[in-house]
Amino acid sequence: MRLFNGLIDGHIVIPPHTGTMAAAALFAMTGLYGVVEGGHLRALTESTTSAAGFAIDGINVSGNVETSPIDVIQKLGLDGHTSLITLDVASARKAIMELPWVLDAEVRKDYPDVIEIKLAERRAFAIWQHGAELSIIDRHGNVIGPLTSERFTRLPLYVGLGAETNAEAFDLLLDNWPELKPRILAHIRVADRRWDIRLDNGVTVQLPEEGAQFALSKLRRMDIQQDLLERDIRSVDLRLDDRVTIGLTEDAMSRRQNALEARERMLKKGRNS
């Protein structure tokens, strides 16, 4: 009330530019409100901070072997004017984690204009064949990506449905047979219940659903005593506890048949003499 009365009776003097300053402040506040309400505050902040020297000018990627730095940069979605201040580190990390080889990622701002990215990558464990497709998997059976490079062709091959998720456990089991493990060309999962192993000489060893370790011990003993795996055979069936079934190759079967026929002729000749 005193202010109002003072204005009326002339006791309070208003500076000559007060009206202009008040109008400018009103317009500034109105403009800021429009920027906030229109969702343009981030863009305004980005353009302002970029102009002030915070535009991202460098990206350092470390810890990568299989992941291309270009793929990492593309995941960030930078446009050449992105400000380091407005960069959302959590969103950037989430985007980078979508890359197939990336197991973990650390994204850090190095002011005024550099992004530091440190990657931890998955380790290729094996090749998984499912149908006609060949994929690289890690130890846990997670698919990393399709097999596209000859660099990975020396990895162990696992074949069939369920082979990828059971590969690690079977690999650990085979560690007990170091003389056999390097000779395995393929680990074949049968009906997602048991394993066959294909050796480098073409022999297929059929293991039981339960007791694979005992069956492999039996195989080792027979190989030591009879040199089994070096014979002219095509398969060793260990699925039954009380017997081992040996499958001969076609040549071996032909030779065996010829030998039986020759023996029969000799016996017949002896009976007729």
Image (cartoon, rainbow, N blue to C red):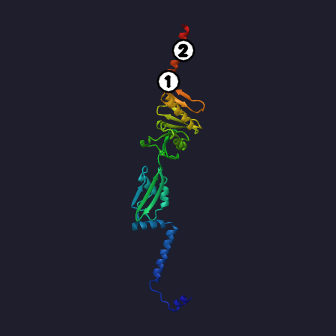
Label 1 is placed on what type of residue? Ala
Q: CA distance from mark 1 to mark 2?
A: 18 Å
Quadrant for the C terminus in the image: top right
Label 2 is placed on what type of residue? Glu
Q: In the image, residue 147 lies at what x, y percent? A: 46, 43
Residue sitting at x 48%, y 61%: 89
Q: Disc number at residue 264?
A: 2
Q: Disc 1 or 2, which lies upstream in sequence?
A: 1
Q: Few, some or many C-alpha atoms within 10 Å of disc 2 (few <14, some 14-19, many ≥20)?
A: few
Q: Disc number at residue 252?
A: 1
Residue sitting at x 54%, y 35%: 217
The quadrant where residue 74 appears: bottom left
Q: Disc number at residue 155?
A: none
Pick the front one: 53 or 272 = 272
Q: State whether residue 111 is above or below residue 160.
A: below
Residue sitting at x 53%, y 18%: 260
Pick the front one: 224 or 82 = 224
Assign a secondary structure to mark 1: helix
Q: Few, some or many C-alpha atoms within 10 Å of disc 1 (few <14, some 14-19, many ≥20)?
A: some
Q: Which residue ends up furthest to the top in the rendered image? A: 273
Q: State whether residue 41 is above or below residue 182.
A: below
Q: In the image, residue 189 lies at what x, y percent? A: 55, 38
Pick the front one: 6 or 156 = 156
Q: Which residue ends up furthest to the front in the rendered image? A: 225
Asked whether the viewer can see residue 190, the reply is: no
Q: In the image, residue 196 lies at what x, y percent? A: 54, 35
Q: State whether residue 186 is above or below residue 260.
A: below
